[in-house]
Amino acid sequence: MLSARFAPALFGLILSGLMSLVVSGISTLRASGPGANLLEVWMGAWLMAWLIAFPLVLLVAPITRRIVQRLVSAAAEAGH
C-alpha cells in the first residue's frame, strides 16, 4: 500500500491515464476510422497523450483547486 502523501500524484496519474485513454480513442477513431490497426495506432496515441497529460495535470491541479474554491466561496457568500 502507498503512503497517503502520494495520493495527489496517484490521483493525477489515474485521472490523466483514463481521460487521455478516452480522448485519444475517440480522436484516433475519428481520424483513421475503424480498421485492422486501430488498437495499435490508438495505444501509440494514448501513450504520447498520457506522457503529456500526467505532468500537466500535476501542474494545473493547484490552479484548478483555487479557481473552484473561489467559485464555491463566491456562491456561498451570495447565499446559494
Image (spheres, rainbow, N blue to C red):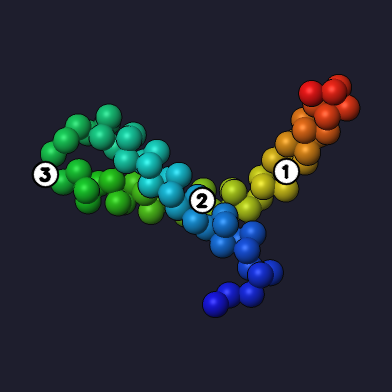
Instruction: Determine which residue is flagged by label 3.
Output: 36
User: Does 32 sit left or right of 62 as displayed?
Assistant: left
Is 63 rendered above or below residue 50?
above
Q: Which residue is drawn at 53% across and 53% down?
A: 54
Q: Which residue is drawn at 57% across and 55% down?
A: 12
Per the image, label 2 sits on a secondary structure element best described as helix
Is 77 rendered above or below residue 57?
above
Residue 71 position, x and y percent, is 77, 30
* Residue 74 makes an appearance in the image: no
Per the image, label 1 sits on a secondary structure element best described as helix
Within-10-Å neighbours for mark 1: few <14, some 14–19, many 20+: few
Q: What amino acid type is highlighted by mark number 3?
A: Ala
Where, quadrant-wise, is the C terminus in this rendering? top right
Q: Earlier in the sequence, mark 1 or mark 3?
A: 3
Q: Residue at x 20, y 43 (%)?
A: 38
How far apart are the two marked residues, 1 and 2, measured between alpha carbons? 15 Å
Instruction: Determine which residue is flagged by label 2.
Output: 15
**Residue 26, quarter of picture:** top left
Q: What amino acid type is highlighted by mark number 2?
A: Leu
Per the image, label 3 sits on a secondary structure element best described as loop
Q: Which residue lies furthest to the bottom in this view?
A: 1
**Is mark 1 in CB contact (under 8 Å) with mark 2?**
no
Q: Which residue lies furthest to the left in this view?
A: 36
**Residue 4, quarter of picture:** bottom right
Instruction: Determine which residue is flagged by label 1.
Output: 65
Total residue callouts: 3
Residue 63 position, x and y percent, is 73, 42
Q: What amino acid type is highlighted by mark number 1?
A: Arg
User: Does 76 sit left or right of 9 as displayed?
Assistant: right
